[in-house]
Structures are given as structure tokens and as C-alpha cells.
Amino acid sequence: MRSNSIVIKLGATIMVLFMVILIPLGYVMDRIFTGFYYGQVHTHIDEVSADIITSLRDLNNKNELKLYQELANHTNTEIVIVNNKGKVLTSSNITQYSKGDTLDQKLLGSLRNNKKIHQNYTDPVNNSHFLMSGRALIRNNHFQGGVLVFSSVDALHQSTHQIREYLILSVIGALILALGFTYFLSKKLSSPLIGMEKITRRIAKGDLNVNIEKVSEDEVGSLAQAINDLAVELKDYRTNRSEFLANISHELRTPISYLSGYASVIRNGLYENEKEKEDYLKIIENESSRLVILINDLFELSKMEENRIELYKEWIDVEELIEGILSRVKLKAKEKSLALNYSSKNKMPMLLSDGMRLEQVITNLVENAIRYTNQGYIQINSWSKKDNVYISIKDTGAGIPEKDLPLIFDRFYRVEKSRSREMGGTGLGLAIVREIVKMLGGNIEVNSKVGKGTEFILSLPIDVAQNENQ
């Protein structure tokens, strides 16, 4: 496993987190237990010394002193009673404080100053450890002596040591459990990520027939779905690119073949008269024009798909725009004896949009309607409803088969390929129309029946607030 593996990184992070929590927690618990037990002992010997000071009557009464020695045996303490000169009056197991010994001056001075004594004591002979509590015996404002109560803490040390061992073992056990949990969690989290890495490397090498099983609904599952979607998109892109290259090759091959063929005929003088030569030159001119239109359309469509077209919005009178378009195409309709009608169903509001691009869309749709309609009429309608402007272009042409309707906005798609070429066009017009409508924030729909005609419906958003202010 690599040192920079996410399993190791995640595992190390979780382990550090556990250690940051467990080690201070163990230390705090040790301090709490130790402080609690030491506090209990301090309280106990302090209470014993206070009781003795309260009940002690005569330092010279041997029976009374003997009674306190028995009290020491029952309370698991060592009781040392001294007179005002610091001489020990009772026997004890404390080496430095046997009967007849004298307190050191510092300790005796604290008692004479009526100070409570709390300190640790270590027997120099047997190395036993004690906690000591001392109080002065004051009678009639005179220092009569003092009481020292000792309690062994050796057993307490042993207990706290055992508690520390238990705490250390608990921390080690928790760390081992954490290590196992960390390994399991790291593997569970990293396993799908490692699988995704392998899949993405296959995608990078061009293998797009991949699928990652979505094992959860969390972020990891979302990432898996995103990679699957990416593979599908790339596959579609590859397919579309192949189709595009095939289509563009086909579209370019025909005019280039005409140009090459007829140019060769003219160059070699393979024509019978000047009229035939003029016909060939006319074909070359037409195919050259068609080639220029095709290249321009491709360039424009490419810019639109990459959002490199800048819109210039202005307030547009929709009725005036449509009437201007019809005045320019009416001659084409007249040549085919087609009626060209326009009707506005209600008062049209001003539309904030790119007038040149909208004109391009409507012109394309109207010219298509004229091109594919041999008899009947072309009807253009406009109306407004709520926050949208609607424009429909309806013809009585051949119509489009239902199976072709979802495809007519694709690049180079033609319903009748041979007849479409004869009628002109590059196969990019509707693709450009769709992109422009999308850029304008609108929508385009198509309804058609074979033998009855086709209707395109544009819907474009209007700025109601702006219209109300005008």
C-alpha cells in the first residue's frame, strides 16, 4: 500500500484523533481518582485530629493518652501527642516520633503559631509514606501542646498504581479497537474511491463502456454517479463527433467534387459551346456560394455552442419586425403562388431581446416553410400571454414524420436528404435556430403531420415591469 494512500491518511487522522481524546482523558481520570482518594484521607485525618483536640483534657493523664493510642489502632492511623516543649508523650510506629522524642523546631513553631499542618511524610527507616494532619492544643489562650495524626498512603499508592495500570490498559485497548475500527472504516470508505480511480483511468485511455455501481446515497455515491454520467457524456460526445465528421465530410465532398469536376471540364475545353461553358461556370458559382454558406454556418454554430456570441438587447416591436421579414420574403412565396399571412391575436408588448438574432430565427423558419411548401399558405401568428411572447409559423407543406421530429434540430439532419439538397440549405439552419432561441432565454416547439403541414412555435420571455414603466 502506498504511503500517500487515502487509507493510511484517513487511518492516521482517526488514530491521532483517538489519541488526542484518550490520552488527555486517561490523564484527567487518573488525576480525578488520585485527588479523590487523597482528599478522603486528608479529610479523615483532619477530622480525627480535630476530635482529639476537642476531647483531650489532661496531657499528664496516662490512661487518657493510652485511650488515644487505642483510637489510633481502630482508625488505621498513627497519633502523636506532644507537650508545649515538643516532647512526644505517646508511642507510635513513626520512627522520628517515638515516645520521648522531640519535634523539630519548624514543626513545633507551626503548632505554637496555631497553624494547621497538612503535609506528606516519608519514614526514613522503612520508607513508608504518610499524610499528616497537625493541630495545636490551646487552652485559655495558652499553647499546651499539639496532636499529629498520620495515615499511611502506601495502600493508596498501590491502589492508584493499579488504577493507572487499568487506565493505561483501557487506553491501549481502546487504541487497538480504534485501530481496527479505523482500518475497517478506511477500507470501506476508500474501496469505492479506489474503484473509481481505476474506472477513470480506463476512461482516460478511451474505454467508455464502464459503469460504477452506486453503493450508497452519500457523497461517494454522488461521485460514482457523476463519473457514470461523465462516461455517458463522453461516449455521446465521441459518437456526435464521429457523426459530425462524417456529415461534414459528406457535405464538403459534394460541392468540392462539383468544383473540381467542372473546373477540369472548362480547363480542358470539354464543352461544345459558350452556353454550356456558362452553365458550368454557374454551377461552380452556386457550389462555391453554398460552400461559403456552409462554412459560415459551421463557424457561427460553433461560437453559439461555446457561448462566444454576445447579445445586444434592445426594445423590439414584434409586429414591425415580423412585417419587415415578410416584405423581404414575399417574392419567394409569390413565385410558388403561396399565400403569406400574418395576424396578431392581441396587442403585443415591447420585447427586450436581440433584434438581429430574433430576425434571423424567424427568417430561417419562414424561408424553410416556403421552401418545403408547394401549395397552400404560410400563416404567421403572434400573441402574448402572461410573461411571454409567442410567435408561430405554420405551413401546409409535406409535413415531417413523427419519428423525425426529435431529430430535426440536430446538425446536418434532413428528413429527405436528396430532396433537401436540391432545395438548398446546409442542414444547419434549425440547429442554429435552436441555439439562438436558447441564448435568448426562450423555447421552440414543433408540431407536424405528414401531408398536412408543420408548425413551429417560439416562446420568448418579456420584462413585464419594464413594459409597465414605458
Image (spheres, rainbow, N blue to C red):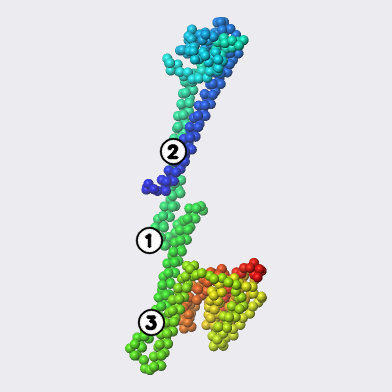
Tell me how far mark 1 sits from mark 3, CA to CA. Answer: 37 Å
Determine which of the numbered discs, if any, sits on residue 176 in the image. Answer: 2
Residue 13 lies, in percent from the top left, at 44, 43
Q: Residue at x 43, y 79 (%)?
A: 291
Determine which of the numbered discs, if any, sits on residue 347 in the image. Answer: none
> What amino acid type should be assigned to the residue bearing mark 2?
Ile
> What amino acid type should be assigned to the residue bearing mark 1?
Lys
Kindly state the secondary structure of the residue where label 2 is placed: helix
- Foreground residue, 52 or 216? 52
- Foreground residue, 211 or 280? 280
Task: Pick whichever of labels 1 and 3 is earlier in the sequence.
Answer: 1
> What amino acid type should be assigned to the residue bearing mark 3?
Ser
Disc 3 target residue: 257
Q: Residue at x 49, y 55 (%)?
A: 222
Kindly state the secondary structure of the residue where label 1 is placed: loop
Tell me how far mark 2 sits from mark 1, CA to CA. Answer: 42 Å
Residue 402 seen: no
Disc 1 target residue: 205
Task: Pick whichever of labels 2 and 1 is earlier in the sequence.
Answer: 2
Q: On screen, 58 above or below 268?
A: above
- Foreground residue, 9 or 197? 9
Residue 467 lies, in percent from the top left, at 64, 70
Tell me how far mark 2 sits from mark 3, CA to CA. Answer: 79 Å
